[in-house]
Amino acid sequence: MTQHESISERLEAAATASDSSVTRTALARAAKKFASYARAPGNRKDADRVAGVLTPEVVAVVGDALVQTRTTEIGGLAAGAFSPEFRESDYALAALLIASGDSELSNSAEEPISRLAALVEQMDPNQAEHVQFVAGLYPELACSTALRTAARARLGLEPETLAASWASGLGLNLPAEYWAVNLAIPSELAEGRADAGVYVDIEHRPGTPSRWSLRLGAINRDVLGADRWRPPKSSPLAAYDRGHGVAGEVPPAGSPNDLPRILRDLEAAHPGLSFEREALKASGSPGRLLSPTKKKLIIAWLSSTSEVDS
């Protein structure tokens, strides 16, 4: 895909064009800072790293560059001409938010934030999700609330994903933006020891098909169901061999909603095998996604005899 001019490149161009040595130095320093980031900010501590290079002139250039970047991307999305850029752009949005709360910088941030908010409804889900995330790092700011409201409205237009349907069916009340859930259900075997716990990964991203997989065993996991699966030469989907008699095949899972059925099928096939549903290990991201109450909802579902609708 054609690459558009980066934030750091726009800062370098502005530095070259400036008649003021002070402004030129500030812009060049900011360009170097933006170009140094290896990845987009993952938390507020990361995002705050940009604060040290902000001046009114830098904020003005960064704000205009961010708006132009998103405008160019939106204009090229239908033709597939541009892919969204997030590494420098997310730091640019963080810079605008930081500046909006600073009396010496806020005038330079106000207009580009307003222009960016007006673009959100035209963004693709991934772009809107990044606005939601970065703005959420500064919840105390009024402009952050406005950006998050616009992003939530945009994400709300997307069809419900398989992962979101699974979560809502259990009453987990997970966010509309990106999240990932990891489940581990340990097992007991009457005789011998087998690596036969069930491991589940579910990932939700608005506007994108959900990623998910169900596997048996912590090491060399046998796949019991997945959104993407390439059959190995020796074993079909949902066939397994964990040793100590735990070997066979079950009807593969068609979605994460089949997990309770998979557990029952495995227990029925191997009377000496039982899954410790109450000992569920559940984690999620970002942050503390799964509270103890939500974990109890998942345990109750695992113990049920009916699945969430696929």
Image (spheres, rainbow, N blue to C red):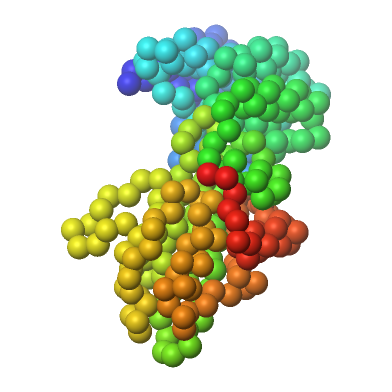
| Pick the front one: 59 or 43 | 43
| Pick the front one: 138 or 291 | 291
Residue 21, given in percent of the width and then of the height, sits at 56, 17
Residue 127, given in percent of the width and then of the height, sits at 54, 26
225, above or below 204, in the image: below
196, above or below 111, in the image: below
Q: Is residue 16 left or right of residue 147?
A: left
276, above or below 244, in the image: above
**Residue in view at x 65 percent, y 46 percent:** 169
| Pick the front one: 71 or 231 | 231
Q: Is residue 67 left or right of residue 239?
A: right
**Residue in view at x 56 percent, y 28 percent:** 159
In this view, which residue lies farthest toward the bottom? 191
Residue 141 shows in the view = yes
**Residue in view at x 46 percent, y 80 percent:** 271
**Residue in view at x 75 percent, y 59 percent:** 293
Residue 301, given in percent of the width and then of the height, sits at 64, 59
Tell me which corner region of the image, top left, top right, bottom left or bottom right, holds residue 103.
Answer: top right
265, above or below 188, in the image: above
